[in-house]
Image: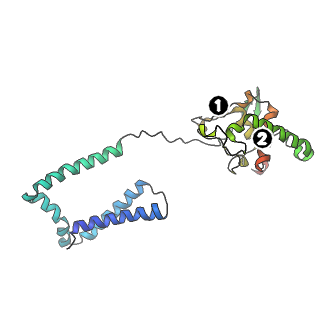
């Protein structure tokens, strides 16, 4: 039995479409935008029908089923069904494409927003570009005292911070799953390893309410720790974070 020319064209288009999905979505696991697939299939459809209508004979054979359905009185029932289904299908497809989505809008927020040049911390205006950890110099000058300060910072962290950021500093504390966004994983090389100590001091002391415009919608659960911790305790916690994770704070000299 010979397959009608119109059905051949439809089968070719289906083969190309599902082949495209199989290769890119399944085999290559590449995310392909729907708009790209539509554009690609538009050109494929145009090419297929150019091939299937390259002369008058092939064109007549291609449109013969459509012409028969429209003109043949014996196919009136089929014609009426098609004339009802096609507009409904087009209208339904247009409706589903154009109806508003009930999904939450995509939130584009900066995880590590740029700090302001100055900030009011502990009742005084601080220049964050020049701010340095007053205890960092002890790392070379007095390693024993430096280690004691780190231990004190560890105690402050366990008492106040581990509930969210975790006892392993991996962002998996007991409260972490109840927060959105989840607490940062300090072990990740993309967090504190990329930041100066002054940046951590600013973020810890000002918390979520201190985030700038580009960090909107300001849904961070980070408290304003300058209301609960002393200034020296914050610096000690910062030293503990870097010591425990094995990261080194970035310095302005290497920027």
State the SS at label 2. Answer: helix
Position of residue 148 measured from the top left corner of the image (x, y, whole percent): 88, 40
Q: Specify the quadrant that holds the N terminus.
A: bottom left
Position of residue 92 measured from the top left corner of the image (x, y, whole percent): 28, 46
State the SS at label 1. Answer: helix
Identify which residue is drawn at 76% across, 43% down.
Answer: 241
Instruction: Identify the image quadrant of residue 163.
Output: top right
Q: Is residue 28 left or right of residue 164?
A: left
Q: Of marks 1 and 2, which one's residue comes earlier in the chain?
A: 1
Identify which residue is drawn at 87% across, 46% down.
Answer: 139
- Between 219 and 58, the residue placed more toward the observer is 219
Disc 2 crowd rating (10 Å Cα; few below 14, some 14-19, many 20+) is many
Reading the image, the residue beneath label 2 is 238
Spot the residue most to the left. 73
Q: Which mark is residue 209?
A: 1
Q: Is residue 160 left or right of residue 146?
A: left
Can residue 130 be seen here?
no
């Amino acid at each position: 039995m010979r397959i009608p020319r119109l059905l051949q064209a439809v089968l070719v288009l289906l083969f190309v479409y599902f082949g495209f999905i199989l290769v890119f979505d399944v085999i290559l696991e590449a995310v392909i935008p729907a708009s790209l697939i539509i554009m690609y299939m538009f050109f494929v459809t145009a090419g297929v029908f150019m091939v299937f209508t390259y002369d008058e004979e092939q064109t007549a054979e291609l449109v013969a089923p459509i012409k028969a359905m429209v003109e043949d009185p014996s196919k009136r029932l089929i014609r009426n069904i098609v004339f009802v289904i096609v507009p409904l299908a087009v209208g339904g497809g247009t409706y589903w494409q154009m109806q508003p989505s009930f999904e939450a809008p995509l939130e584009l927020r900066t995880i590590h927003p740029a700090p302001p040049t100055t900030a009011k911390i502990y009742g005084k205006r601080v220049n964050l570009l020049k701010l340095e950890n007053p205890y960092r110099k002890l790392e070379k000058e007095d390693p024993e005292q430096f280690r004691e300060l780190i231990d004190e910072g560890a105690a402050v962290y366990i008492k106040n911070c581990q509930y969210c950021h975790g006892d392993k500093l991996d962002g998996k504390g007991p409260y972490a799953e109840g927060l959105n966004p989840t607490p940062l994983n300090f072990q990740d090389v993309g967090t504190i390893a990329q930041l100066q100590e002054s940046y951590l001091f600013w973020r810890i002391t000002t918390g979520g309410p201190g985030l700038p415009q580009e960090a909107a919608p300001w849904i961070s659960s980070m408290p304003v720790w300058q209301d609960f911790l002393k200034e020296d305790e914050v610096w000690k916690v910062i030293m503990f974070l870097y010591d425990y994770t094995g990261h080194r704070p970035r310095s302005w000299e290497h920027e």
